[in-house]
Amino acid sequence: MKFILVMQLCSFSLGTCDVPMERSMPFNSYEECAISGHLNSLQIIRQLGPEFINEHQTIIRHWCQKEHEI
């Protein structure tokens, strides 16, 4: 079974979330997908920088879906 990573940028200060984005490459296991979600989230947070993160109270939501559920 393959899994697709879905990520979404959210702002608590604005009370909004962007449209979820799917990563095109499927993962062979849920674990691989979950680890990638955490690592990608950290990379995005670092790219956005502390000023943006603090101002918008930004988080990155991520989840893994079975490939056929999309």
Image (tube, rainbow, N blue to C red):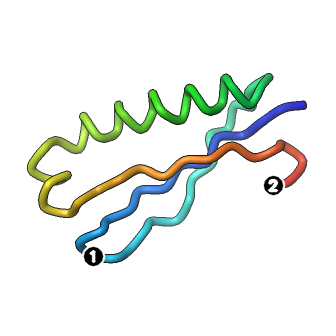
Q: Amino acid at mark 1?
A: Leu
Instruction: State whether residue 34 is above or below residue 49.
Output: above
The front one of 9 and 25 is: 9
C-beta proximity under 8 Å, tags 1 and 2: no
Q: Give the spatial CA distance, label 1 vs label 2.
A: 28 Å
Q: Residue at x 74, y 27 (%)?
A: 27
- In the image, residue 17 lies at what x, y percent? 43, 68
The front one of 8 and 13 is: 13
Instruction: State whether residue 69 is above or below residue 64.
Output: below
Outermost residue to the left: 51
Of badges 1 and 2, the one in the foreground is 1
Circle 1: element type: loop
| Residue 28 appears left or right of 21 | right
Instruction: State whether residue 63 is above or below residue 16.
Output: above
Q: Amino acid at mark 2?
A: Ile
What residue is shown with label 2?
70
- In the image, residue 10 lies at what x, y percent? 38, 62
- In the image, residue 44 lies at what x, y percent? 34, 39
